[in-house]
Amino acid sequence: MVISRHFSRQQRSAVLYGILCFVLTLVALQLWLLTATVDAWLGGDDSIVWPALGASSVCLSFNLGLLRHLRIE
């Protein structure tokens, strides 16, 4: 049995704003991660590059997953 729920415009906009807040927070985290990684790399520390790439990839996958839920119906 499938129950179809129709959300009001106010409920949909609350979900939209929540998702966008998470996306913007993750993008800011990625920007900080890029800045810290470039600073460390230019300072001669090559050991941080690959873990930072992994962390940035995780942030990207979270962002893509959240943005996938913003289908326009």
Image: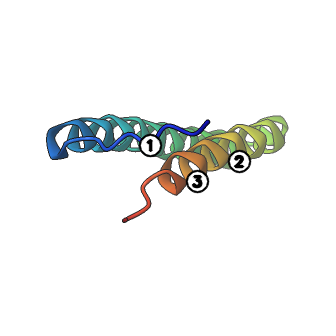
Task: Look at label 2 and name its amino acid.
Answer: Ser
The residue to which callout 1 is attached is 4
The residue to which callout 2 is attached is 57
Q: Report crowding for label 3: few under 14, some 14 to 19, many 20 or more residues within 10 A (C-alpha).
A: few
Q: Quadrant of residue 52?
A: top right
Q: Residue at x 56, y 38 (%)?
A: 36
- Distance from Cα at disc 1 to Cα at disc 3: 26 Å
Q: Report crowding for label 1: few under 14, some 14 to 19, many 20 or more residues within 10 A (C-alpha).
A: few
Disc number lying in front (1 or 3):
1
Disc number lying in front (2 or 1):
1
| Label of residue 64 in the image | 3
Quarter of the C terminus within the rendering: bottom left
Sequence-wise, the earlier of marks 1 and 3 is 1
Judging depth in this view, the residue of 26 and 62 nearest the camera is 62
Disc number lying in front (3 or 2):
3
Instruction: Tell me: residue 57, above or below residue 68.
Output: above
Judging depth in this view, the residue of 3 and 56 nearest the camera is 3
Residue situated furthest front in the rendering: 1
- Distance from Cα at disc 2 to Cα at disc 1: 35 Å
Look at the numbered discs 1 and 3 and tell me whether their residues touch, using CB distance below 8 Å: no
- Distance from Cα at disc 3 to Cα at disc 2: 10 Å
Q: Report crowding for label 2: few under 14, some 14 to 19, many 20 or more residues within 10 A (C-alpha).
A: few
Q: Residue at x 62, y 36 (%)?
A: 1
Look at the numbered discs 2 and 1 and tell me whether their residues touch, using CB distance below 8 Å: no
Q: Residue at x 44, y 43 (%)?
A: 4
Local secondary structure at mark 2: helix
Q: Report the colour scheme.
A: rainbow
Q: Is residue 42 left or right of residue 24?
A: right
The answer to whether residue 48 of the structure is visible from this angle is: yes
Q: Residue at x 37, y 65 (%)?
A: 72
Q: Position of residue 10 (x, y in %)?
A: 15, 39
Judging depth in this view, the residue of 38 and 55 nearest the camera is 55
